[in-house]
Amino acid sequence: MQSFRAAAVQLRAGPDKPINLAAGAEQVRHAAGEGARLVALPELFAWSGPASEEAAQAETVPGPASESLGRLARELGIWLVAGSLLERDEPSGAARCFNTCLLFGPDGALAARYRKIHLFDVAIDGAVAARESSTRQPGSEIVHAGTELGSIGLAVCYDLRFPELFRRLAVDGVEIVVMPSAFTAPTGAAHWHTLVRARAIENQCFVVAPNQFGATSHGFDSYGHSIIVDPWGEILAEAGADGPCIVAADLDGERLEQVRRKLPSLEHRRLEP
């Protein structure tokens, strides 16, 4: 992989899609202006609201939101991970939408589409209660894309707890995993740093994890602490818990090769993922 600068955008989305899209685009432009060649937005950055409204907010891909994001990537000449959007799958006629992460190239073309596989159905007493499967359907495909920067794999938020997904990406040659998130504050305080670093260490890859922050319509906060981690598990950049911001770091291709050379654990695997 090349050495290049990557940026993770931290923000808090609300129920006004035009405002969210404008805020996200402003941050992406700022990151690109500071030299980032890969910029990632968080999960559901374009709209976040009551579950009962998700079907009405879902769009097809291509659609208005995705087309505007493609134009933004082309305007700035960057690789853009457009967080995730609620995607309506019109051919299937399904009532539930997908939570879809999109990767656009510097030419504005859609390079990859990943539909979140693992749905967040949890009930933690007094802290978090969510049932994504009531309004969303899971994807089924592991997705990565070869780029001039390196091989980029995609995951979304709750996927972080399923190491087999990341190992499959590593076996496929992925060097950078981008993981848009809206990780909750209660679970984030307990597990976010540990899990992000573990996925980077065990798969010897960079992980770029933009997260939402602050209050949501679901009764719990998002954790913030957007983070970029290197293949040795070192934190290269990290945001705080509150406030919109951009964190950026240089991803060193030689660093990745060095880690994989001096501790070739991926070559020592005895079991298939």
Image (tube, rainbow, N blue to C red):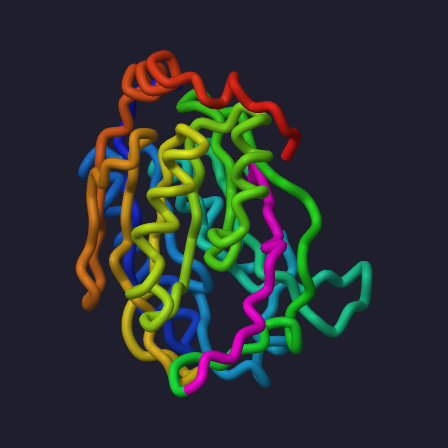
Whether 118 is among the magenta residues is yes
Residue 136 in picture, x, y percent from top left: 65, 69
Main secondary structure type of the part rendered in magenta: strand
Locate residue 201 relative to residue 60 in the image: left or right: left
Above or below residue 156? Residue 260 is above
Depth check: give the residue in front, 128 or 73: 128
Report whether 57 appears left or right of 36: right
Residue visible at 40% across and 30% down in the picture: 205
Front in this rendered view, residue 252 or 69 = 252
Camera sees residue 77: no
Identified at 39% across, 82% down, the residue is 127
Taking 218 as reference, is 256 above or below it?
A: above
Toward the viewer: 41 or 67? 41
Rendering coords of residue 157 (x, y %): 46, 57
Residue range corresponding to the magenta coloring: 110-125
On screen, residue 230 above or below 56: above
As drawn, the residue found furthest toward the front would be 270
